[in-house]
Structures are given as structure tokens and as C-alpha cells.
Image (cartoon, rainbow, N blue to C red):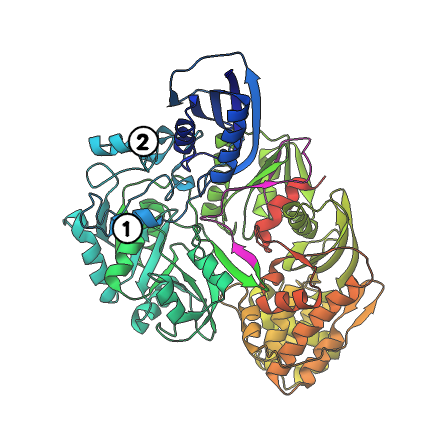
Amino acid sequence: MKFETYRIAINGTVQGVGFRPFIYQLATSLHLYGTVSNGTQGVEIVINATSDTLKIFIQKIEEELPLLAAIDNITTTQIVQKLFTSFQIISTKEEGKRTVRIPPDVSICKECEAELFDSGNRRYGYPFITCTHCGVRYSIIFDLPYDRKNTSMKFFEMCKACEEEYTNPLDRRYYAQPIGCWECGPSLSLWDNQRSVFSIQCSEIIDVAVQFLLDGNILAVKGVGGYHLMCDATNDEAVQKMRERKKRPTKPYAVMVANVELARELAVMSEQEEELLTSKERPIVLLNAKEQGYSKLVAPNMTRIGLFLPYTPLHLLLLKKLNRPLVATSANITDEPICTNKESLAKLQGVYDYVLDHNREIVNGCDDSVVMAVKDQQIILRRARGYAPASIKLPFALSKNVLALGANQKSTIAIGFDNEVILSPHIGDLDTIDSVSYFEKNIQTLECIYDFKPDVVMHDKHPNYESTKYALSHYDNTKAVQHHYAHILGVMAEKQIRGKVLGVAFDGTGYGDDGNLWGGEFLICDYTGYERVAQINYFKLLGGARAIKEPKRVALSLLFDLYGEDAITLQNPSIKAFSTTELKTYFIAWEKGLNAPLSSSVGRLFDAVASLVGVCHTMSFEGESGMMLEELYDASVAGYYHFDYEDGKIGIFSVIKEILLEKNTSVAVSKFFHTLVEIIYTIHRQYDLPVVLSGGVFQNRVLLGLVLERIPDAVISNAIPPNDGGIALGQVVAR
């Protein structure tokens, strides 16, 4: 047998997932000698093998790779012969372009969970138990390659027992960078809202924290990518206190439950939804609630509940001891980034009673992901922990390095190089100084880790978006991309669509080419450009930005369109929501176009209908009107309202008239949903093109489900959010 020497380069998610130990064990089992190392582009293997043995080795790599690993490509090259006498895992100082994927944070594995509750195990009850198959990754990384010295675990020196595991290639914790134990790893602390620390043993802290929860207190609990605010989900008083202190009167809270059996007691779920709930990503999953086993204040007036399972050993310890569901909401000021350290948490000092803390630094903040299932499709509403950062392969290679800065709401950023895009986790809305700083940190993180320098910087066309301002003030090589075009391009990139499509972009607000606020758009587009072929006819937004939070203003504007000043005399819920003086003042503003920009937004149309039928005149959180209309939908109602369509303009005034005449609110709302579907279907029939759906309005499960029923081949994103969280990906591929 003649042995040759081969270099094998493997790209993909191959660091921080137990890949090198896997290669070591595989090579040893095949009696192969050589080395395996991490580099900036993935994993490199140098090995002595015959051509036949090499084929077997490569085949086994592809078929037996670790659970968290993913391979993009394997390149094998024969090199000058070098003889090895053993197989070793080594460290290298490889230079060059960085293309290896940053592994996301994932949930605790079954093996670690078993050890956590095994009284005979040395890590029994240890809140940071982990191995190469689970736990923190992205949230602790400073730089690549993914080695302990490049993470926040570098501040914890391993004890002898941990080091033996860490250096044993046959151990499950071999090169598990976050490895630790009671003796040498991160530890818990407990303090009150005055920062007074409780002097108790670390092993007793869980018991004390659980008692605080049982007593109705609010705890800020440091997790993987930030803090949660937690309280007993069965305690009305505790949940109400959380609402009052957080100034969140009605927005539903997510609930964490100990296991899937308890989740089944609280919600009805399909097989797909259960798979999402129990997946290694552990997202919050929106489910049909059973309305028992938790306080009605958790999700007021809603028949849906967001449930998720514990994904850290600390969560498991809390829930096992507590034995009841927990409200677990992100610790942040509304629309600001999640708190990741004591300094940022100080802003919530008036919300929490106690803090369950730990001393492992969160390097990169990462919120909880939120998903739902519609017509057997996974829809990501917030793409963060477990899913991000993620690599998306493009259907073509980029000619330049691209930095995309996204939009202003649901912000994400992206970097693109070769045929790959790295999309950041959810950042949030860029409405405060802190959120813009967090946005900037995410840019710096990706640029630093990937040693990335952009040739061009893409941004939204809206001149007042903070992302646009940042682009223009920090870079010279910028290019604007229209908002709704970027929406459609993001889906096309994810789905590897190369040709032209009919894009349907329905959202709340996007800056149009004519300076108006678009949001009900039909675009024929490919990567080189787009044509707006249809739109919802413009209507005025009374009060400009205020109309976004006050649906009654949009409804009033539409009533003025229909009836002029006579609208003031109508006996309608929207009219009754204003005083006589306000009505007269707003009519003058509407008539003269004072602070009343034109909009074609379907999101604002949802708002108007919610007000007209009397269910929502002002919103305490984004999307509230659409959620309330979901609750009123009746699947037994058939038919739709008449709408006008001529020369690419979709007139909705006749729709509003018929809604006003409808005596049954549920019928009115149901027919409104069907009307939107009929509008999409009508435009779709004119073009022999694939239909691509995007925009925040398609987060509405009723509307999306109805569209997918009527147009089964319609394409919706599954890996990026339909909302503005997918804009950055679309910007990257715009030419």
C-alpha cells in the first residue's frame, strides 16, 4: 500500500461543535496518521492515506459529522509527502481571509442535562454545565478561531479535572471551550435592586431565588445572550406588577415551561410546532393556548401564547425547583437592546426586585428567537439566539465585499463576500442612543471577527433612518436600496431564486421612490432592478408618525376620503374616539394636507379596519391591531369585498364602505382578510411569474395562511423574518 499526504480543507460550521475531536476519533478508528487544526476558513486536516482509505475517510466525515456541524464544502489536495507517526489535534496561526462560520448558541444537550440532575456527578446542580455538543458559542466569542483564549472563558483557569477532560480527545468535553465546574468555572450571585449582595453559598442561591419567585417577586436573570425579567406565570399579582413596572399594558409575554409535557398542558401544538419547541435552537413558539395553567394577564384577550423550553442548566434548575411556568421576557426598555451587563440593567432598577447574576461576560448580546408554523412552514419572526449569526449561501458570487445596514425597525446588519452572507442576530429598533450604539457594536463585531472591510455599504432610502445616517456619516462608498425591493430580494437570496418574480411587499412603512410612504406594493424584480406594477391607492396619515400608534387617525382619514366633512356626523367607533373639536381640527389638517403624508401601507390599512370595527383605536405595541383582527377571524365566513383595480392602482374605499355597513364585526374582519387575498390573487393572475411574499404584514398568521391556501406555490422566507429583519440580506444582493 502506498501512502500519500493529503491536505483536506473543510468549510462551514466546523468550529465550536466538537469537529476536531470527531476527526481525531474517526482518523484513529481508521488507523490514519496526521493532524487536524482550526483556521480562519474552517478546519484543515493533513493526513497520510491511500486513495481508497481517503475516500472512506471523506465519506464518513460527510455521513457521521457532529449534530451541530454543517459542511459547505470539502477540498482535498495531494501535497508533498510528509510522514506522521500519530494523529494529533494542533493549533495553528493561519492567516488569510476569514470565512469560517461563527457557531450560534444552542440549548443544553441530553447528556449534560442527565449529569446536571445526577447526584453522583461532580457537576451535579452546576448551573453552567456544558460540553462540545451544547451551550454558549456566539455570545462569548471575541475573535476567531473559536478557541478558549478568544472567548470570555479565558478569564477562568481550568482545574485539573476539567483540564484532563479538555485535553482528552476521547472525552465529550475535549476542547469544549466553555468547560468549567463548581471549582473553576463561572459562578452565581444574588443581589437586590439596591445592589446589596446576599452572602450565601452558590449551591443555595437557586433555592433562595425560587422562593423569591414564589413570593411574587420579579427577578432579572442573566442568561446566555442577556437578562430575562421573570415572574411566576400563575400569579396574577406578580404578572400585573410586571406590566405596571415595565409599562407594558397588554403586549403578550413569553412563558418558559420545564418540559414539553407541561407545554402540552398549556397549548395545542402540531407535530411541527413540537419539533420547533424541542429543537436545539429552543425558540419561543407561538401556539394556540388552552387558557389554563397560567394567569390570563400573560396574554390578555389573546388565544395564542408564546412558549419556550429552558435552554440553559440555570433555567432547568429554576423550573425544576419552582414546578410552575415562568414569564420570561427580555430585560430591556421597550424597543431597546436586551441588557447584557450590570450597567445596562441599571435602567430597569425600578422593574426588578432581585437579580440572579453570574460572572461569565456576555460579549455579544443575543435575544430569544421567535417562530411560528403556518401551513407547515416555519416562519421566523425574530431571528436571534440559536439561529444567528448564520451564513446564507447566495445563488451567485458577489463581485465586492458588501456591508448592509438594514432598516430602522427590527434592525439587523449583514456582511457579504464571495457567495456568502453573514446576517447578524436581531438588534432592535434604532430609536435611542443606546440602540444605535448596540447597532454599531454589531457592525464592529462582524468586521473584526471576519477581518472584513467593505467595498460598498448598502442602506435604506429613507433619509431619516438612523441606519442611513450612520452609513452616510461613516462611509464614502454608499448605495441606497429601496425598502420593499430589499424585502423581496432577501427572500429571493434565501431561496436561491435567479429569475424574475412578482414580489408582494406588504408592511407598515417604507420610503418610496416618489417620497411617499409605501407598504402595499407589487414589484416585478430581479437582482438588477424592479418595476412597481401595482399598489394600494394612496391615503393620508393624519398626524404623520402619530398615526402609526393611533389607528383611529388612519380610520378617520379614510372616512374623510369617503364622506368629506360629513364624516364627523357618522355613528362609528372611530368617530366616537375623538372629541368634536378634534374632528374639526383634523378635517382641516386632512383637507390641507398638513402633517398628513400619503401612504399605500397595508399595515396602516389593518390599523384603520381595527379602529373602524371598534377593537383598537390606540396601540400599546407594534402589530397589536393585526393581532386583534386575527382573534376575530371566523374561518366559516366566505366572500370578499369589492375593490377597484385600474392602471395598477388598487382602490380600497369601496372596501371601507362595505365594512361600515357590516353589522357583524367578525364577518367584517373575515371578509377584509379574504379581500386582501383576492387582491393578491388578482394581480398574480396577470403575470406568469413566481409570487414572493415579504414584509411585516405577512407575520399575520391568518393572512399568510389564506394566501398560501389560495396560491400554494407562493414563496415566503423560512430562514429570515418577513419583517425588516430580512432587509439587510436583500440589500447585500441588490446590484
Q: Residue at the location (48% across, 31% down)?
A: 449
Image position of 184 with respect to 206: above or below = above
Q: Which residue is mark 2?
A: 154
Q: Residues within 10 Å of mark 2 (few under 14, many from 20)?
A: some
The three-letter amino acid code for the residue at tag 2 is: Lys
Relative image position of residue 583 (x, y in whole percent): 63, 77
Q: Is residue 383 magenta?
A: yes
Quarter containing the C terminus: top right
Q: Is residue 595 magenta?
A: no
Quadrant position of residue 294: bottom left
Residue placed most toward the observer, 481 or 119: 119
Q: Which residue is mark 1?
A: 114
The three-letter amino acid code for the residue at tag 1 is: Ala
Mark nearer the viewer, 2 or 1:
1
Image position of 440 with respect to 597: above or below = above
**What is the count of numbered marks?**
2
Name the N-terminal-most of marks 2 and 1: 1
Q: Which mark is residue 651?
A: none
**Is residue 617 visible in the rendered structure shown here?**
no
Q: Residue at the location (38% across, 62% down)?
A: 260
Residue placed most toward the observer, 671 or 227: 671
Highlighted range, magenta = 378-406
**Is residue 681 visible in the rendered structure shown here?**
yes
The local secondary structure at tag 2 comes to helix
- Residue, far front: 1
Residue placed most toward the observer, 696 or 292: 292
